[in-house]
Image (tube, helix red, strand yellow):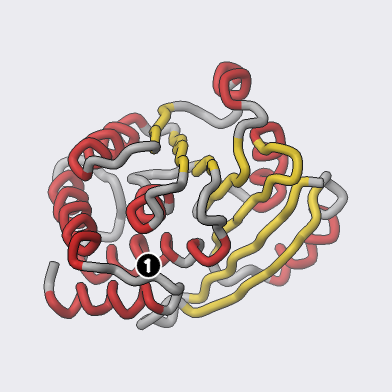
Amino acid sequence: METENKNLLIEGAKAFGIHLDDKILEVFDLFLRELLKWNQKINLTAIQSEKGIVLKHFLDSLSAHPYLPKTCSFLDIGSGAGFPGIPLKIVQPSLEVTSIDSTRKKVDFQRHIIRMLGLKGIEPIHGHIQDKEILQSMGGQFDIVISRAFSDLRTLLILSLPFLKRGGRVLAMRGDVSSEEIRHLQEIERTPYCLQKTVPFILPFSDFKRTILLFEKE
């Protein structure tokens, strides 16, 4: 990783209350290099620059860190090449992470990088969250369902519901939430959820507008 991008990662992580030591930086460096290498052969991400990956994948994933308990089980829906689940696992090893994605090559990459990084307590699954077999095997197991780029808010909440424990939460990572989505929040609140928090912010060292929405299952 170039020095400039490493410094972006270090300082950006500080904005989310995360200290990255040399060992963790080495892990992120390996993750970055493997992602770039695999991406030359198969389409894992449209972002192909070191800086873009550091900002839009690593730091964006870490933005969820302040809203996670020190220990919890979470399901990452539509995890792609492992975001946000793998970066969060790297900085908080006590998390129990399950990720699911419908694209096999992306799940294969996750399995590869998890082995390479020596991460424990994280399991990638190939499939659709709507699959009956997945619901039967994982229903009611998770403290948190998290998603960075999966469908609209209402669909995410409805599909997340059976996977959450009572009192569990959905952490939705969105872009600049539109006025239309905000208008729909009243409708969303008719589901068995309470909207706890809406956190708009600018991703460090960029002009990317992001929003985190926290819902609790009643």
Is 159 positioned to the left or the right of 104 in the image?
Answer: right
Q: Quadrant of the N terminus?
A: bottom left
Is 218 positioned to the left or the right of 89 in the image?
Answer: right
Near mark 1 (Cα within 10 A), the count class, few <14, some 14-19 or many ≥20, is many
Choose top left, top right, bottom left or bottom right for residue 192: top right
- Which residue does the image show at 27% across and 39% down from the upper left? 114
At which x and y percent is residue 35?
A: 21, 50
At which x and y percent is residue 4?
A: 17, 80
- Which residue does the image show at 21% across and 64% down from the upper left? 25
- Which residue does the image show at 57% across and 20% down from the upper left? 137
Q: Residue furthest right?
A: 190
Residue where numbered disc 1 is placed: 59
- Which residue does the image show at 36% across and 49% down from the upper left? 86
Is 161 positioned to the left or the right of 143 in the image?
Answer: right
At which x and y percent is residue 32?
A: 20, 57
Q: Check the image and report above or below for 143 versus 2.
A: above
Q: Nearer the viewer, residue 77 or 41?
A: 77
The secondary element bearing badge 1 is classed as helix
Is 210 positioned to the left or the right of 5 in the image?
Answer: right
Q: Check the image and report above or below for 63 versus 166.
A: below
Q: Check the image and report above or below for 26 versus 42.
A: below
Q: Nearer the viewer, residue 52 or 118?
A: 118
Choose top left, top right, bottom left or bottom right for residue 187: bottom right
Number of labels in the image equals 1
Q: Nearer the viewer, residue 171 or 16?
A: 16
At which x and y percent is residue 194?
A: 80, 55
Three-letter amino acid code of the residue under disc 1: Leu
